[in-house]
Amino acid sequence: ITDEYQLSQNYPNPFNPTTVIEYTIPFTSYVSLEIFDVLGKNVYSVHKELQSSGRHKIQFDGSKLVSGIYFYTLKTTNFVQTRKMILIK
């Protein structure tokens, strides 16, 4: 159990075609994870859902995307953070 929010760097990074995104939330809360291309277009979204406190993992499959830089953003009621990842095919 943790007392802070944390959005970890995806691994592997760069990736082809899948990567894992891990995050930790200290309280049960609504969580949204979105992935954007460099132009700001949303290419993947886990809609807001209630999640329990603790560590969570999402495996992202980028096989339908082109090579490039992408950004992923974790949003909760009290926290927002964005990180960068690279897809190489």
Image (cartoon, helix red, strand yellow):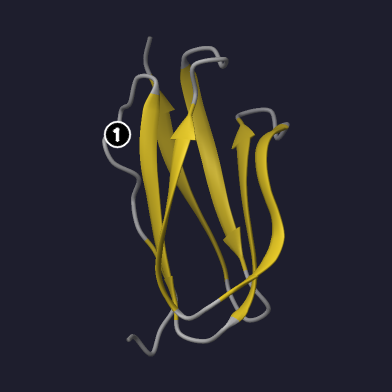
Residue type, mark 1 in image? Asn
Left or right: 44, with 27 as reference point: right
Please name the residue shown 35% across and 58% down the image: 8
Q: Position of residue 43 (x, y in %)?
A: 67, 31
Q: Is residue 49 above or below residue 88?
A: below
The residue singled out by tag 1 in the image is 13
Quadrant for the C terminus in the image: top left
Comparing 83 with 24, the one in front is: 24
Q: Position of residue 54 (x, y in %)?
A: 40, 77
Quadrant for the N terminus in the image: bottom left
Please name the residue shown 38% across and 28% down the image: 18
Q: Residue furthest bottom?
A: 3
Q: Is residue 46 above or below residue 69?
A: below
Q: Position of residue 66 (x, y in %)?
A: 54, 12
Comparing 25 with 82, the one in front is: 25
Q: Is residue 3 above or below residue 61?
A: below
| Dot 1: element | loop
Q: Is residue 30 above or below residue 74?
A: below
Place residue 15 in its image quadrant: top left
